[in-house]
Amino acid sequence: MPKTATCAALDEQGVTPVAGPLGGRRRFIQLAGTLSLSGVVGAPAAPTHAADPAAPGEGSFELGEFVLQSGATLREAKLAFKTHGRLNADKSNAIVYPTPYSAHHSDIEWPIGPGKALDPEKYFIIVPDMLGNGLSSSPSNTPPPYDRARFPGVTIQDNVAAQHRLVTEGFGISRIALVVGWSMGAQQTFQWAASHPDMVARIAPFCGTAKTTPHNLVFLEGIKAALTTDAAWMDGWYEKQPSRGIRAFARVYAGWGLSQPFYKQELYRQLGFSSLEDFLIGFWERRFLRRDANNLLAMLWTWQHNDLGTTPGCDGSLERALRSIQAKTLVMAAETDLYFTPQDIEYESSHVRDATFRIIPSVWGHQAGNGLNSVDSAFIDAALKNLLAS
Amino acid sequence: MPKTATCAALDEQGVTPVAGPLGGRRRFIQLAGTLSLSGVVGAPAAPTHAADPAAPGEGSFELGEFVLQSGATLREAKLAFKTHGRLNADKSNAIVYPTPYSAHHSDIEWPIGPGKALDPEKYFIIVPDMLGNGLSSSPSNTPPPYDRARFPGVTIQDNVAAQHRLVTEGFGISRIALVVGWSMGAQQTFQWAASHPDMVARIAPFCGTAKTTPHNLVFLEGIKAALTTDAAWMDGWYEKQPSRGIRAFARVYAGWGLSQPFYKQELYRQLGFSSLEDFLIGFWERRFLRRDANNLLAMLWTWQHNDLGTTPGCDGSLERALRSIQAKTLVMAAETDLYFTPQDIEYESSHVRDATFRIIPSVWGHQAGNGLNSVDSAFIDAALKNLLAS
């Protein structure tokens, strides 16, 4: 729906414009969620609009006419998010935790909770939804003419620019205690530290790289080819999801997302799957059938084009961009990750001034960082606590 | 064409039935090839039929009514092959070198040549074509009713049974100096040793396992899904190759076939490719576009179902089957192989009585065994020479 209509509608319902550093020139919409979060009892199912923008819950930040690196302008652009905990008086307890590939903010809550590193009783945790994920501006929810197959390429820098607007204009935060993220969340984490070195105290990118490696790009070419081979995809102009293509995409992804020993040891049984085929369908196909095909391709484009070296002032040099990071840095890699390999991640971390590199000892491959295996999750949680205590 | 017609036609052209151990009850057809092999000048382009079945060149062995493990019968079944060198008087110098996935016998000649381990001046090297590869009985060349999508599942044991017929009935060989193979060739190599322990002096399976691991099966599920998502595949009843599906299959395969550092170091430039995309198209898409889609799927079925433990008498136990191997065994794995991992291969080799396990130190991933990189090829060649000298 058009922006003015949205804003008018929300104004009528009592939405408070936020006076951020830039004077609150953008509308800020905070929608209380229905989930019980960290001891906060959720609002009723019908969305309501909190008067306090920093109250826990889901929200959407109006980016207005959002100019992308590509030169395209997303009009009525929006950044969805969810927050946990409360922003303290001096606004010093913010953590930014961006979403990874294909996830919604609700999919990655495993490290958030009382007693955990991301403790909502101590921190104000903002989980911004990646552009393209179906909640923030995406092919599936952008009005014409930039809708569906016409959705422009969005970079990691574009994502961080949008998140920066939310954090500064929306919440009036000028210093972030921690940016942390898994996988594509790690990409955004690196970018935060490189784009806003004075603003980010700590970063903890895990199972992700600051620049997409050529092999990782090839893996993505494979899943893209699997999806787009479905004639029902119709070059993105489908009226009905190309579900066979999405299922093929998922089936290819399955080989990459975990490790060889994970499958040999049948660890999917720990997740409640009754057979290998049940896991391929029940975990992998289900995971991506929830999503829109163009959205999956949009985020894939973002992933393929991720390159911290393109940060302004870095002259295209990944190493230079990494050296520019001022934040206290904890970089983690999963021992058996097949596309964000420990070798690639360690190489990058060696170029960050104040970095610690740790390997998550796990056979869960890339999924070691997804909160599925309690041992891996405990390892990550402990490492994050150490970092936050430093 | 019907079997009787084939045999009659060939009889008229002077094909000699071979008196093998079983009395020559099968027709044996030796077609001299057009290639120059190992110093042997090839015959003219028009195929001729050599009077001497053991002369170097291409050939086809008539298997007649070939009963598969599944219970299906392939009528007029044939096993294509090529031989290099000459069988000696006491028939003691035979090497069997089966083809890997999707390859023809002409694709894997890199370890064959004067001065190499597989020296045609010393050895009689038989390269049998895997069933399903388009030269031996395959979906693409089998007459109805078992043609195309109806081609039955063929196992590694079926392949070895057919090859055993060629070796014993066709050539009258009762002892093989070496069975050697890469990838799916390694699967057939293990099977030779387990099915015919008294017949095989040495084996050298490299970059392949005696039983397909679950992760390897998932990788294959991915490429299968990519291909079969193409509507042009028509469940196998296409009249025209589903080329988009084959290209998607190839693009997924590209990520698995080499290693992460291979791509990072751009080693495809050593093969004459000008960019990553040029490599994906010029190497991977080209490789599989040469093949028939149903053939690719037939060999994939064989691969997914490979299990040495199902050898009769082994009670389904992989370890028991491996322990039954009598041959002097050299097992090699490529250090960075993503689907036939060194760990999986070493595990299997630890159950073979007289086995040496070696890792090919290489960043060429699975392709380390495909003769593309001279350092890897020299490593394999030297190891094979050692084995043959023992």
Image: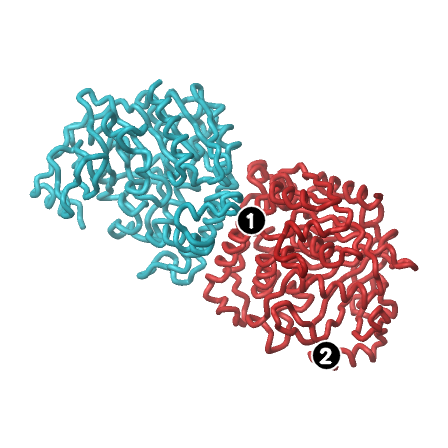
Chain colours: A red, B cyan
Looking at numbered disc 1 in the image, what kind of residue is underneath it? Answer: Ala
Q: Measured from the top left, where is residue A169 in percent x and y?
A: 81, 68
Density class for disc 1 (Cα within 10 Å; few <14, some 14-19, many ≥20) is many
Residue B34 appears in which quarter of the rendering?
top left
Tell me which chain the residue with mark 1 is part of.
Answer: A
Vertical order, A26 against B208 (above or below): below
Q: Position of residue B209 (x, y in %)?
A: 45, 33
Q: Position of residue A64 (x, y in %)?
A: 72, 75
Left or right, B275 with reference to B77: right
Is residue A241 visible in the rendered image? The answer is yes
The residue pinned by badge 1 equals: A254
Q: Is residue A183 left or right of residue B315?
A: right
Answer above or below: position of B148 versus B119. Answer: below
Q: Which mark's residue is nearer the viewer, 2 or 1?
A: 2
Q: Is residue B53 left or right of residue A299?
A: left
Residue at label 2?
A3
How far apart are the two marked residues, 2 and 1, measured between alpha carbons? 39 Å
Q: Tell whether A62 sits left or right of B336.
A: right
How many marks can you see?
Answer: 2
Secondary structure category for the residue under label 2: helix
Is residue A268 visible in the rendered image? The answer is no
Residue pictured at 86% horizontal, 54% vertical: A93
Mark 2 touches mark 1? (CB < 8 Å)? no
- Residue lying at 59% horizontally and 66% vertically, measured from the top left: A153
Please tell me the numbered disc located at residue B165: none
The residue carrying pointer 2 sits among few (fewer than 14), some (14 to 19) or many (20 or more) residues within 10 Å by Cα, namely some
Chain for mark 2? A
The answer to which of marks 2 and 1 sits earlier in the sequence is: 2
Q: In which quadrant is the N terminus of chain A drawn? A: bottom right
Q: Amino acid at mark 2?
A: Lys
